[in-house]
Every structure is written in C-alpha cells, then in structure tokens.
Image (cartoon, rainbow, N blue to C red):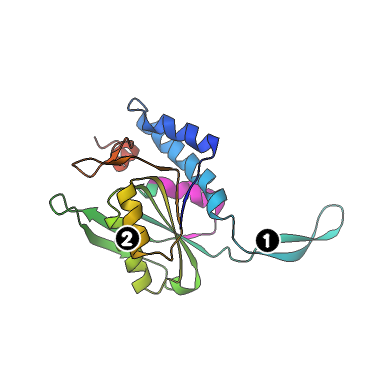
Amino acid sequence: MITEIKHPLIQHKLTVMRKKETSTKDFREILEEIAMLMVYEVTRDFELKEVEIETPITRCKSKVLVDENIIIVPILRAGLGMTSGLLKMFPKASVGHIGLYRDPKTLQPVEYYCKMPSDIDKRTMIVVDPMLATGGSSSAALTLLKQKGAKKIILMCLVAAPKGVEVVERDHPDIPVYVASVDEKLNDHAYIVPGLGDAGDRIFGTF
C-alpha cells in the first residue's frame, strides 16, 4: 500500500531540505510546497461526479470531487509543517490534531493530546507527519483514529525508513501510505539515515 512519489520537482526540493545549511525559513516553506505537490498523487483516485455549470459563454457539464469533506490530521508537532500546504489545496477542510511523543528510553509513542471533529466516520482523513522513522507514532495515531470510528484514512509522510514502512504495513495493511523517499535505515538513536535531521526542530527553529 506504499507509494513512493518520485516526481523530479519533489525530489529536487527534498534535496534542498536535506542540506544542513538550509535555513528554518526555507525548510518550512519548501515542506509546505512539497506537501502541496504530494497531494496531487494522494488524491489521484478520488472520485469525481458530473455537474452542470454556467461558464461566461454557455452552460456545460463538468466534473467536481464527490467528497471534499476532508479532515487533515497532523501528528504534533512536525505534522503542522505540512498542514498549511494541504489547506491551500483543501481550504474547506477541517483540521484534527494528534499529540504523540516518542519516549527516549523505550522509543514507544505516548499520546498526550487528541482533538477531532465529531463525524470522522463519514469523512476522508489525511494524516500527515514528515518523518516515518520507527513507525510507532504513525501506527499508534492510525489505531487511535480507527478506535474513534474513522473509516477512510490516508497516511502522508515526507521521508520514511524501511522499519517504519514495515511497521505501518504490518499494523495497518488497509491504509495507503504516500512518501517522497524511503531512505536507507535508522541509526542507533532511531533517526532516519540519511534523513534530514529532526523535522520538528528544523521547522520551528528549536535547535
């Protein structure tokens, strides 16, 4: 269920993000741009319906999305960096939030916050987090959403490690996953290699 989006423009921008000298401002702006570009692939199979409209010239039939009722769900805090890009494509979307942090000793996810719209069972949810490292936080977030009644979920990440992909595919084989790159591995501190460092720190300048 994983799709690695290898569009040249996305790969070019990702390379700029990986560079250690890239500023917080540029990192944040490029992440938003890549999120917008990735949405084109994420929504490729969204259903369309035909409606009748009036152009300045004549009436005609044209296509619109059947379901614009999207919920964007950033996994705090780094997921916030992708949210603005998606909102530019889906300005009417709701935004839910899931707060998880990785215990530095056990490396297991710990939930500290969750706020969602009440009708998630009727809506498409796009969960966003730049890094899919161990897969623990993403898997826990997806499990939590299912427990709350979510029926249609998509996971969108920037960079993934093979371990993270393996965990999500094992725990949630029904959920499509979109990434810009599957990197080489995790290091001893569970950071993606080569990766791009701590995405949250680079987005918010908290070095």
Taking depth in this image into account, of 24 and 9 the one nearest to the observer is 9
Taking the view exactly as shown, the residue that stands out farthest to the left is 105
Residue 70 in picture, x, y percent from top left: 51, 62
In the rendered structure, the answer to whether residue 116 lies left or right of residue 40 reads left
User: Amino acid type of disc 2?
Assistant: Ser
Identify the residue shown where x is 33% and y is 55%: 166
Side of 31 where 57 appears, left or right: right
The magenta region covers: 81-94
For the question of whether residue 13 can be seen, the reply is: yes
- Residue 198 in the image: state x and y as whole percent: 28, 40
- Rendering coords of residue 90 (x, y %): 55, 55
- Residue matched to label 2: 139
Say what amino acid the circle numbered 1 marks: Val
Farthest residue in the top direction? 21
**Mark 2 surroundings: few (<14), some (14-19) or many (≥20) residues within 10 A:** many
Q: What residue is pinned by disc 1?
A: 64
Upstream in the sequence, badge 2 or badge 1?
Answer: 1
Number of numbered labels in the structure image: 2
Q: Position of residue 124 (x, y in %)?
A: 50, 65
